[in-house]
Amino acid sequence: MISKKVAEALNAQINKELYSSYLYLAMAAYCKAEGLGGFAKWMGVQAGEERGHAMKLYGYLEDQGAKVLLGAIAAPPSDFGSARRVFEETLAHEQLITASIHALVDLAVKEKDYATQGMLQWFVNEQVEEESTAAEVVAKLKMVGGDARGIFMVDRELGARAG
């Protein structure tokens, strides 16, 4: 049986994952408006992935017989300044989500909730990938600087993301 503390924390994480989706949709809209269709596609796929994370937690709470409580989702920013800034903010956001997942693991350990610890391991591993991918794109954008050809090449690469 899942404790009330763990259920509340997982409900809060659902909100964070849905905000992540909302943030990436805002980033997709910004990129599309800037003529960066590949960046926009990548962010759209990422938004869907984040919704999937929220639904994974949602389903887990249901399976545990806990009540799912959805909260308001804050409005994300709409202007990011540059493609590089989009991915710098993506990396910073993913680092916040990683810290939140780690706090959930700590809580599950404290509550001796072995099922939740096991379920959260998937998220721990996923966050390694999320941070690594965002950091890789940031590094590429730093490498090309403001060079339009370089940004075009990164845009084309990001547009090839399956989704």
Image (tube, grey):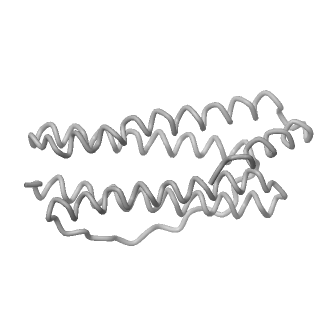
Rendering quarter of residue 56? bottom left
Residue with the most extreme front position = 162
Q: Residue at x 26, y 55 (%)?
A: 10
Q: Residue at x 44, y 38 (%)?
A: 127
Rendering quarter of residue 119? top left
Height in image: 112 above or below 75?
above
Image location of residue 25, percent across then percent down: 61, 62
Image location of residue 99, percent across then percent down: 37, 39
Q: Residue at x 79, y 45 (%)?
A: 155
Q: Nearer the viewer, residue 15 or 63?
A: 63
Image location of residue 46, percent across then percent down: 57, 53
Is 19 left or right of 162, judged from the image as shown?
A: left
Rendering quarter of residue 57? bottom left
Is 106 left or right of 13, judged from the image as shown?
A: left
Q: Residue at x 29, y 43 (%)?
A: 120
Is 112 left or right of 41, judged from the image as shown?
A: left
Image location of residue 41, percent across then percent down: 70, 56
Q: Quadrant of the C terminus?
A: bottom right
Is 101 left or right of 144, judged from the image as shown?
A: left
Q: Quadrant of the N terminus?
A: bottom left
Q: How many marks?
A: 0
